[in-house]
Image (cartoon, helix red, strand yellow):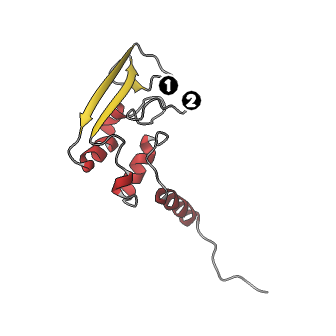
Amino acid sequence: MYCCKRQPPSLRNICSDKYFRDLRHFSFTNSTTFNQYVDAVLSQRVPRERLIPPGFPSLLFSFSYNTFDAKFHRTCPGIRSWHGQISSTFELDSDAISSLTDETQKNTFWCSACNRGLFFPNTCQFHPH
């Protein structure tokens, strides 16, 4: 009886191969979510220039809100009464990347409905333009 001595790849190896293959092709676009961005930054496999937000060093965040704790794209679902804008200027790209990945600042820079960047104008997974 012939028995194959080669072991099939483990589920862990298959998943990590897929994960790192996806990171090699990472592109910071209006469809990038907070978690995808954080994964790309933490992996240290994505070149820094592909992690810099659009408009760097000055970022303009346009949003709608009801309370300042939750911000939304104007087209995303959610209850809100006002529209606002915040402008932030970063001296170093590492400061911008650090701020965008900071969980405590997530509600400042990322939409509460679709988890996509508020620095990309008019983006929403429910209402793409």
Q: For this view, does 54 lie left or right of residue 9?
A: left
- As rendered, which of 87 and 97 lies closer to the eye? 87
* Within-10-Å neighbours for mark 1: few <14, some 14–19, many 20+: many
Q: In the drawing, does residue 12 fall left or right of residue 68?
A: right
Sequence-wise, the earlier of marks 1 and 2 is 1
Identify the disc placed on residue 126: 2
Q: Is residue 121 left or right of residue 85?
A: right
Q: Secondary structure at mark 2?
A: loop
* Residue that mark 1 sits on: 76
How far from the left and from the top, in percent, is residue 81? 40, 12
Task: Name the residue located 26 percent from the left edge and 50 percent from the top edge.
Answer: 94
In the displayed structure image, the side of residue 126 where residue 58 appears, left or right:
left
At label 2, the amino acid type is Phe
Picture coordinates of residue 86, whole percent (x, y): 29, 27
Vertical arrangement, residue 7 with respect to residue 101, above or below: below
Q: Residue at x 34, y 20 (%)?
A: 84
Q: Position of residue 14 (x, y in %)?
A: 57, 64
Nearer to the camera, 38 or 85 = 85
- In the rendered structure, are the residues bearing label 1 and label 2 in contact, judged by CB atoms less than 8 Å apart? yes
Q: Name the residue rendered at 37%, 50% in the picture.
A: 51
Residue 108 can be seen in this image: no
In percent of width and height, residue 87 lies at 27, 30
Residue 43 position by quadrant: bottom left
